[in-house]
Amino acid sequence: MISLRLLDLSENQFNGSFPSLLISNLTNIESLVLSSNEFQGMISLCVFANLSRLSELDISFNHLEVETEMMSPSCSPSFRLSTLSLGGCNVKKIYPWMFHNITSELWLSNNNLTGPFISNFQNITSKLTILDISDNFLRGTLPEDINLNFSELRHLDLSGNSFNGNLPMFFTDQLQMLDLSNNQFQGEIPYSIKSNMSCLLYLGLSQNNLTGDLFPKNSSLPNLRWLHLNNNRLSGTFPYALSKSMKLRILDIQNNELSGELSSYLPVLPKLKILILRGNQFEGQLPVKICQMRDLHLLDLSENDLSGDIPDCVDNVTSWLGRSENAVGYLPDGSRNGFVFTFKGRRLIFKGVLLSFPMGVDVSCNRLAGKIPIQMTRLKGIRILNVSNNLLTGQIPSSLGNLENLESLDLSHNNFFGVLPHELVGLPVLEIFNVSFNNLSGMIPIANQFGTFLNDSYLGNPDLCGQPLSIKCNGSTETPPIYARAEKSVSIMYFAVLIGLFFIVICLE
């Protein structure tokens, strides 16, 4: 098929040796996409050297070892590629021809690139708009004026390497995606990143050793959608400057050293879907402003020092009321903090793995008090509810049995008292249940999935009885509460019948 201009066989199960001879005969080919198959063996890019019309080449994520040197006279590239994708191809070195012969996109993630960054790119001036060298073994510092080497960049992903030192002072102000997460950077976030990048959609600096305040008041990132600064040592209060980022969808700044009254600084972000602030030192009451973020899917404020009652306006978050759907967003590919979520596609600005995570509320490990508000029992869309390790009290609301999509319910380490509502056995998909270390009493329900929960779910409640505990209820562990109530009703009816017969006998006499 010598007239063929576009061939896309990606995401299949083709295997065996790479079809080098076949490919070299496609003299009119412009776009060749063979990614995500099972091809194997060692090949050289010299196979493609004479394809003068080739513009896009994607052979990523097979089982290949690709030699990228094309310096010999017989192997000088005759093409000027727009896009080269060699992710997961066991590439060991970046050669200068890549920056002269590739005009737009270079994808080199998940390879065996080693050595310092500066030795690969010194004195290079490139027109690349996308550069992805994530998940390699590169090390050393980045040049402060990296924008001079790559003045046209829109997408820069250096995550998952071993870069260290301070972050570069200057990036091109046209950047839309910047991911430097999972490295060893230190020091403060440069002012240029916080204020002079109006096009920025995604900023990932998580899993480094960054310190200092997040954003000053005069910061402005008006188009920011995704912000990941988790697992650093950032301090100060919640960055109120984010009130200018009204398009923000995902905000993850967990496991830092932020403090202050959260309710004083947290702005209303109307499009926010995921808010993760766990593992900081925020204090004060739970912000009522959360109730105005009606599209919120995941709220995680655990492991802080928050106090007071749970706001009774939580049912204003309309996304928690309806049918449960997993939240979606963009997190760094290969993120080691438990949340991984990226867009995938050669033609999208972001590339990675599409995942999702469940809708839920986690306010565990704080100092919250009072009762569970009845409004919380109307959140039929949530799959996770964790209020453990607080100072909550009162009886467990029987209306929690209405949360039909609930998969995990943790009420442990509080001051709840009374019996376990038998309505909870009606939760059809409940897999994780924990009420340990409260002041509960009475018989444990054993119907439906409650027959699968172990002792650990009920420890620290000395007045609870019945299976799976060894403490028997009234001499028997076989009668769950719903049947016990029925037996009680039968006993009353039997007693009433006896009284009736007694009066009939007296009347006959």
Image: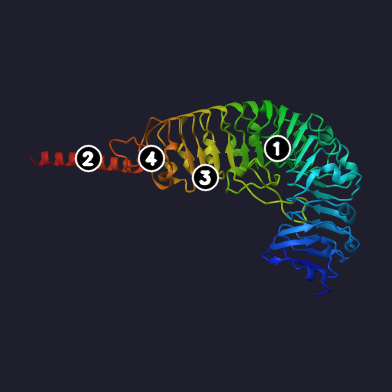
- Give the residue drawn at x 72%, y 30%: 234
Give percent across and percent down for residue 442: 36, 34
Nearer the observer: mark 3 or 2; the answer is: 3
Residue 395 in the image: state x and y as whole percent: 45, 32
The residue at which mark 4 appears reads as 468
For the residue carrying disc 1, how many other residues have a C-alpha within 10 Å: few (<14), some (14-19), or many (20+)? many
When the figure is inspected, residue 76 is found, relative to residue 243, above or below; the finding is below
In this view, the residue in front, 319 or 121, is: 121
Q: Report which residue position mark 3 lands on.
A: 407
Of the 4 image quadrants, the one containing the N terminus is bottom right
Amino acid type of disc 2? Ala
Quarter-of-image position of residue 474: top left
Marks 1, 4: nearer the viewer:
1
The way the protein has been coloured in the rendering is rainbow
Mark nearest the camera among 1 and 2 is 1
> If you read the primary sequence from the N terminus, does the residue marked by circle 1 or circle 2 appear first?
1
Question: Tag 2: Cα neighbours inside 10 Å, few (<14), some, or many (≥20)?
Answer: few
- Residue plotted at (65% across, 27% down): 282
Q: Amino acid at mark 4?
A: Pro
Between discs 4 and 3, the one toward the N terminus: 3
Residue 207's disc number: 1
Work out whether mark 3 precedes mark 2 in sequence or the reverse, and give the earlier one: 3
Q: Is the residue under label 4 in contact with that under label 1 (CB below 8 Å)?
A: no
Query: Cβ–Cβ below 8 Å for labels 4 and 2?
Result: no
The circle on residue 239 is: none
